[in-house]
């Protein structure tokens, strides 16, 4: 099953084509490609040409749904939904933090995946490897870096781009190397492919990014509305 993977949750975006778990082609996105749907479509066209495939060859679209950048997630999800509708294939929503966990080296089995939530906070969740699957333990949360640090006890390892904001606060021996921190479209595609094989697919009309919190603009608007008598 040819699966298109789209990852636009953070500073390092990417797209990939995977078939039967094997990556056929992958490329990182330029900053404009992550932020603008028109450019992302051109990146996808180039990826398909690189692999010698047509849009209708895709049997699944897997997209990273968050948490992460508000703008990046919105662009990625809208693009995935539009592509899936146009070619008539299922869409699979992939937990971004799970995609980070699944990027871990083979010997690692227990991680806390972390993304920057801004305002001095981190999105994070713990994942444990069960065979080829990564199972989330509990809910995705927003916490301070100090709170996350307190959970990095053996055998748990820390990973994810959120660590870049405060690596000095974390014990270095508990962190994975930086090359494993960023979610990749190749991993998103593999996870989405497995979800569809297992009969788990998402509705192309109702699928939304998983923001976890409102944007700063929305919070300011709510506060101003509350102050109006």
Image: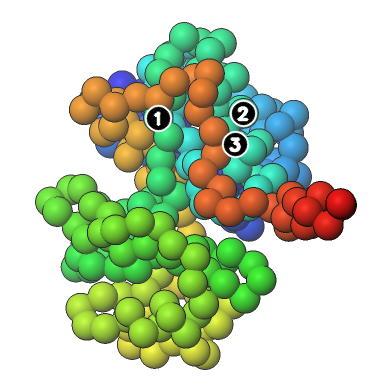
- From the viewer's perspective, is 8 left or right of 216? left
Lower position in the chain sequence, tag 2 or tag 1: 2
Answer left or right for 68 relative to 130.
right
Label 3: state its secondary structure: helix
Residue 176 appears left or right of 4? left
Give the image quarter of residue 78: top right
* Residue 179 in view (yes/no): no
Please name the residue shown 41% across and 40% down the image.
Answer: 94
Residue 23: percent from the left, percent from the top?
37, 38
Of residues 228 and 146, the one drawn nearer to the viewer in this rendering: 228
Residue position for label 1: 92
Mark 3 nearby-residue class (10 Å; few <14, some 14–19, many ≥20): many
Q: CA distance from mark 2 to mark 1?
A: 13 Å
- Check disc 1: other Cα within 10 Å, few if <14, some if 14-19, many if 20+: many
Judge whether 26 appears above or below 147 on screen.
above
In the rendered image, the vertical position of residue 172 relative to residue 204, given as above or below: below
Residue at the spot of label 3: 76
In this view of the protein, which residue sits in the foreground, 220 or 203? Answer: 220
Residue under label 2: 78
Label 1 sits on a secondary structure element that is strand
In terms of secondary structure, where does tag 2 sit? helix
Numbered badge on residue 108: none
Do labels 2 and 3 touch, CB within 8 Å?
yes
Instruction: Identify the residue at the far right of this view.
Output: 228
Q: Which residue is rendered at x = 40% and y = 25% of the image? A: 202
In 3D space, how far apart are the residues under numbered discs 1 and 3 (Cα atoms)?
12 Å
Q: Quadrant of the N terminus?
A: top left
Please tell me which residue is depicted at 49% across the width and 20% down the height of the picture.
Answer: 204
Tell me where residue 133 appears, x and y as whole percent.
Answer: 21, 48
Q: Horizontal and vertical percent for residue 226?
A: 78, 53
């Amino acid at each position: 099953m040819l699966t298109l993977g789209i990852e636009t949750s953070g500073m390092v975006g990417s797209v990939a084509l995977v078939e039967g778990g094997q990556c056929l082609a992958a490329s990182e996105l330029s900053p404009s490609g992550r932020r603008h749907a028109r450019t992302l479509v051109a990146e996808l066209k180039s990826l398909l040409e690189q692999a010698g495939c047509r849009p209708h060859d895709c049997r699944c679209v897997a997209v990273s749904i968050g948490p992460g950048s508000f703008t990046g997630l919105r662009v990625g999800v809208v693009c995935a939904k539009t592509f899936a509708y146009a070619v008539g294939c299922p869409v699979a929503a992939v937990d971004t933090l799970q995609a980070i966990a699944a990027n871990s080296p083979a010997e690692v089995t227990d991680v806390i995946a972390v993304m920057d939530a801004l305002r001095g906070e981190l999105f994070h969740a713990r994942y444990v490897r069960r065979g080829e699957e990564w199972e989330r333990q509990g809910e995705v949360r927003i916490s301070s870096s100090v709170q996350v640090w307190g959970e990095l006890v053996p055998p748990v390892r820390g990973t994810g781009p959120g660590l870049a904001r405060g690596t000095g606060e974390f014990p270095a021996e508990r962190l994975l190397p930086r090359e494993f921190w960023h979610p990749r479209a190749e991993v998103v595609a593999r996870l989405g492919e497995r979800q569809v094989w297992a009969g788990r697919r998402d509705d192309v009309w109702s699928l939304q990014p998983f923001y976890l919190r409102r944007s700063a603009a929305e919070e300011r608007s709510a506060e101003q509305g509350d102050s109006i008598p």
